[in-house]
Image (spheres, rainbow, N blue to C red):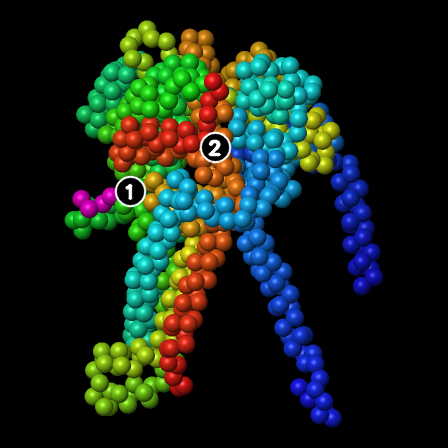
Amino acid sequence: MKKCLLAVTIVLIAISVFAQQKVTLTIESWRNDDIQIWQDQIIPAFEKKNPTIHVVFAPTPPAEYNGVLNSKLEGGTAGDLITARPFDASLALFNKGYLADLTNLPGMNNFSDVAKSAWITDDGKHVFAVPMASVIHGFFYNKDIFKKLNLKVPQTKAEFMQVLEAIKKDGRYIPLAMGTADMWEAATMGFQNIGPNNWKGEEGRLALISGKQKYTDAPYIKTWKELASWAPYMPKGYQSVKYPDAQQLFTLGKAAIYPTGSWEIALFEKDAAFDLGIFQPPVEKKGDTVYISDHTDIALGMNAKTKYPEEAKKFLEWMTTAEFASLYSNALPGFFTLSNHKITLKDPLANEFLSWRATCKSTIRNSYQILSRGDQYGAPNLENELWQVSAAVINGTMTPEEAGKRVQAGLDKWYKPKK
Amino acid sequence: MLDLRGRRTFPTFLVVFLGPAVVCYTLFMMYPLVESLVLSFFSVQPDNSYIFSGFANFVRLFTDSDTAPRFWGALKNNVIFFLIHMLVQNPIGLLLASLLVTKGKGRGFYRTVLFMPTVLSVVIIGFIWQLILNPLWGVAESMMRAVGLGSLFQPWLGLPEYALPATALISVWQFIGIPMILFYTALIGIPDELIEAAVVDGCTEGQVFWRIKFPLILPTIGIVSILTFVGNFNAFDLIYTMKGAFAGPAYSTDIMGTLFYRTFFGQQLQLGNPTMGATVATMMFLIILAGVLLYMFLFQRRVKTYQL
């Protein structure tokens, strides 16, 4: 018995000595698709330079992330570094004291004000996360199918509908790979993808915040009408088709066009056995300015209650460097660094997405900043409402006008624009 | 309790026997339950502090133009969910149990196979059924087409009018083994003499079942019903696995469990609200409590239990 106790004590001492040498930092994230890349590329690069720090990437599935993270923060068991969603969701975490103030983190000056805008307090005084990446919305298409059917890449809305019709007539392929079962595709890959061309990007987004425009206005109704017109070209039974179903439908070469965003590049390049192409959200008539959703999507903050603030800051500081920017953007093609560092992207599709920034006007999803603060129960959350109504409009269970009315009514309930 | 000299002593062994259960139950069941009930009378402030707000949460839950439809909708869906179980799961469970007690071949095999889904993980059940019913690669449509019913196939899980019955029936498929086994054990507990005597007296099969077996298993029917009720009003996992916390389309599969989850933990950009979540949980508790009390006073006290 005594020997046993002695052995246990020795082991415990050994463990604690070992633990003192190495500090373990845990990263909370919703990017479970990226676990391999963090483990094999990003973290080893950091640990090589900081041998005393061990970093663990511990993701939660995207749909559960916010809920799980909140309860972990509340219970005091959250990781040291916290992947932050843009704008209101993370701001609320900062206001509750869960995220640390990183305004004075060395290296923050590598980011522009626009990049930081998603993780800053309203008065612009406190930055609470290191911006990591933005994603650009657009359409993927199967070049082989387009060639076989002799189709041209559509630029205008009319051309887009003609292409869909032509593919449908041919009958061999599903024109548009998309489902509404998970709802967010309808809002994120539909509404926020094609909408900016209707509401003129930032102009419309800011007008919503200032109260000059409403979701019942023409540009929004029009966007929902366009979405509803997609339904006949979606796979049969699209009401119960989920996001992974649609992804597979496209990568298996059974569907011609896939509305989505740059974040799919890595997966599609891995799975698709055909030539991939991308095109911008279609405009009204040739030559119109294209507005793209170039959404500041992901950042990393620090748990205010972390046991190792110095080490966590070291990691965050490293994330502001050119080394990280280049490593991350190349390891995850389609996630574009928000830093000012000049980096070269090796992936051709990622480069093509990125080139749109030069010719198109960028905006972000219109429901993320300020307008999604209806987070107290009883004031519906705008983003969640957009999911519901956009899916319902495509399913044909709600008219575009009803959708606009419902979203605006929910917003009016709690949001009073500053006059 | 009397000692050797006839004096009353404290029954120490009772404490010893009951102690562990009382302590564990109080610590892990009663305390959290009471805590959660208390929490429903508070509301959370933007700076994360809690203030007492009386019945405000309940008033909001029942009357607010956004909250109330969700609550009543979830309650209604939950009642439908329960009724489908009562009307489909339990009669079929009884039927299967009656078949299992007859002297047919392969009874042991069927007993095991029918009980199997019950012990499978809900995640697997949800995944399998989503694949079966998938309109793109599901086997359901081709099977229906093989028997000439292809035109009747619909993406049931994605249509508001069908999604709830579809998920309820999947849940029935999974849990059918529980009423089946309970009825089965009750049926094999009936002494053969009773049945033999009835047959000798000239009872038909039907009469034997309705006049002799049924009254004898009535207490089990009660237990199965109340288990179904409690299980259904606590249900969450299957719907969450298949339809997510939004319980779509258009909240058509939203039941109390998913409503609670969404409210308490939040969803996507909506942050969770612990006190409002506790309010929903309190309502779930009260609904289940009311059901159990009704059962105890209206059914259990009146039902005749025969000593066999």
Residues at badges 1 and 2 in contact (C-beta under 8 Å)?
no
- The reply to whether the magenta stretch includes residue B154 is yes
Residue at the far bottom in the pictured view: B5
The residue to which callout 1 is attached is B159
Secondary element type, mark 1: loop
Residue B109 makes an appearance in the image: no
Say if B230 sits above or below A225 in the image: below
Q: Quadrant of the N terminus of chain B?
A: bottom right
Q: Nearer the viewer, residue A248 or B202?
A: B202
Q: Residue at x 62, y 14 (%)?
A: A110
Q: Nearer the viewer, residue A308 or B136?
A: A308
Q: Which residues are magenta?
A: B151-156
Q: Where is residue A50 shown, x and y percent of the image?
A: 72, 27
Q: Quadrant of the C terminus of chain B?
A: bottom left
Say if A20 sits above or below A266 in the image: below
Say if A104 sits above or below B128 in the image: above
